[in-house]
Amino acid sequence: MEDMKEIIKQYVINEYVEDDSEVTFDTPLISGGIVDSFSMVSLKRFLENKYKISIPDDKATPEAFDSVNKICLLVNEYLK
């Protein structure tokens, strides 16, 4: 799971962080303003493609995407 956390964290930093803000596994992504609703859609698509899963729209909530740790928990629910 550590590899997954690093991959997701690096993706978030590369795609959404515009300054030198430090992102940790617990950094609030949605509520902290790093990831907005449009970005959340592209993040969901990245996760589905990277991990060959399908995350139902009703599970892709701002709460579920609010930190790298929470995203990993969500992804792990759908891994086979």
Image (cartoon, grey):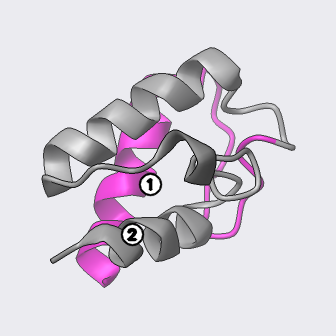
Compared with 74, 34 (above or below) is above
The residue tagged 1 is 9
Q: Is residue 14 magenta?
A: yes
Q: Residue at x 36, y 41 (%)?
A: 11
Quadrant of the rendered image containing residue 62: top right
Tag 2: Cα neighbours inside 10 Å, few (<14), some, or many (≥20)? some
Q: Left or right of 77: which side holds 1? A: left
Quadrant of the rendered image containing residue 53: bottom left
In the drawing, what numbered circle is on residue 49? Answer: none
> Residue 16, position in %: x, y?
54, 26
Q: Secondary structure at mark 1?
A: helix
Q: Secondary structure at mark 2?
A: helix
The residue tagged 2 is 5
Compared with 71, 57 (above or below) is above
Spatial CA span between label 1 and label 2: 6 Å
Compared with 14, 76 (above or below) is below
Residues tagged 1 and 2 counted as in contact (Cβ below 8 A): yes
**Quarter in which the C terminus is drawn:** bottom left
Q: Amino acid at mark 1?
A: Lys
Tag 1: Cα neighbours inside 10 Å, few (<14), some, or many (≥20)? many
**Seen from this angle, which residue lies furthest top?**
38
Of 28 and 49, nearer the camera is: 49
**Quarter in which the N terminus is drawn:** bottom left
Q: Residue at x 42, y 24 (%)?
A: 42
Q: Which residues are magenta?
A: 1-30
> Residue 10, position in %: x, y?
37, 48
**Seen from this angle, which residue lies furthest bottom?**
1
Q: Left or right of 42: which side holds 39? A: right
Q: Left or right of 56: which side holds 60? A: right
User: How many numbered marks have been drawn onto this rendered protein structure?
Assistant: 2
Q: Amino acid at mark 2?
A: Lys
